[in-house]
Image: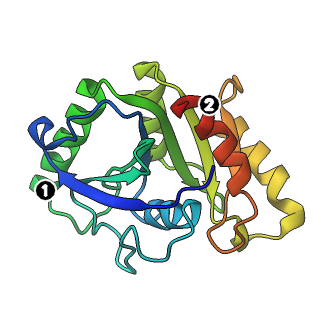
């Protein structure tokens, strides 16, 4: 899929701020520094559509990006960032849960994890939440450029064994640097937006 005019639509913290159309929504979840914004930029071949930051935890709202009026990428705030106050963590957690439980247009959840590390307790909690939601999900093992190309497949297999032993979810490596995995991700997204 080629996206010609991706655009930032709105930041939201409550349902009344969500887009009112019925376009499919592809939701990105993952910990604070896993690279969700870079993932969006790489997928649409833009450098600055989604704001990236060297300081994790900057995203504190739900950001909606319109993809040629075909679907939205929805970037949820990352979890597990300790510099956010407890009160702020609760507030952000509440509106994330409200979105995930109430939004009727979610077509696919893209769950990003870091290929270099075993899933954290927070990753496992999010995984269980996604499974319990019974929504379609694909797991992206991001930052594949940080390990040797020859080890990528084996590491992805190990991550799946750790997080998803039933092997009922698709796991795909990804790298914003190498950009060699985008076609595999687009193939999956296209199944849920057409």
Badge 2: few (under 14), some or many (20 or more) residues near its Cα, within 10 Å? few
> Quick one: 118 or 140, which is closer to the camera?
140
Which residue is depicted at the point 62% across and 30% down? 191
Q: Residues within 10 Å of mark 1 (few under 14, many from 20)?
A: few
The tally of labels here is 2
Dot 1: element: helix
Mark identifier at residue 88: 1
The disc, 1 or 2, on the residue closer to the chain's N-terminal end is: 1
The structure residue drawn at horizontal position 43% and vertical position 41%, both measured from the top left corner, is 71
Q: Residue 95 in the image: state x and y as whole percent.
A: 18, 41
Q: Residue 97 lies in what quarter of the image?
A: top left
**Taking 135 as reference, is 92 above or below it?**
below
The relative height of residue 136 versus residue 17 in the rendered view (above or below) is above
Q: Residue at the location (60% across, 42% down)?
A: 139
Q: Position of residue 22 (x, y in %)?
A: 31, 30
Instruction: Specify whether 132 is left or right of 42.
Output: left
Between the C-alphas of marks 1 and 2, the distance is 36 Å
Question: What label sits on residue 149 in the rendered view?
Answer: none
Tell us which disc is closer to us: 1 or 2: 2
Q: Secondary structure at mark 2?
A: helix
Residue 70 horizontal/vertical position (percent) = 45, 41
Q: Please report the residue visible at 34 percent of the width from the left and 78 percent of the height from the top.
A: 55
- Identify the residue at the far bottom of this view: 54
| Placement of the C terminus among the 4 image quadrants | top right
Figure colour scheme: rainbow
Q: Position of residue 14 (x, y in %)?
A: 12, 41
| Badge 1 vs badge 2, beta-carbon distance below 8 Å | no
Q: Which residue is mark 2?
A: 191
Name the one closer to the observer, 103 or 153: 103
Asked whether, in this view, residue 60 is left or right of residue 100, the answer is left
């Amino acid at each position: 899929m080629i996206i010609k005019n991706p655009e930032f639509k709105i930041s939201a913290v409550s349902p009344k701020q969500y887009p009112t159309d019925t376009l499919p929504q592809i939701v990105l979840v993952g910990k604070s520094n896993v690279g969700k914004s870079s993932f969006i930029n790489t997928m649409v071949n833009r450098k600055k559509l989604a704001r990236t930051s060297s300081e994790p935890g900057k995203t504190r709202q739900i950001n909606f990006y319109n993809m040629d009026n075909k679907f939205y990428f929805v970037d949820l705030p990352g979890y597990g960032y300790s510099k956010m106050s407890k009160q702020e963590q609760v507030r952000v957690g509440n509106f994330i849960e409200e979105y995930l439980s109430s939004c009727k247009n979610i077509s696919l959840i893209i769950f990003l994890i870091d290929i270099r590390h075993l899933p954290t307790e927070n990753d496992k909690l999010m995984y269980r939440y996604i499974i319990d939601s019974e929504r379609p999900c694909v797991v992206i093992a991001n930052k594949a450029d940080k390990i040797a190309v020859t080890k990528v497949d084996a590491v992805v297999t190990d991550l799946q064994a750790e997080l998803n032993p039933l092997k009922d979810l698709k796991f795909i490596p990804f790298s914003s640097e190498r950009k060699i995995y985008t076609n595999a991700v687009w193939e999956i997204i296209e199944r849920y937006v057409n």
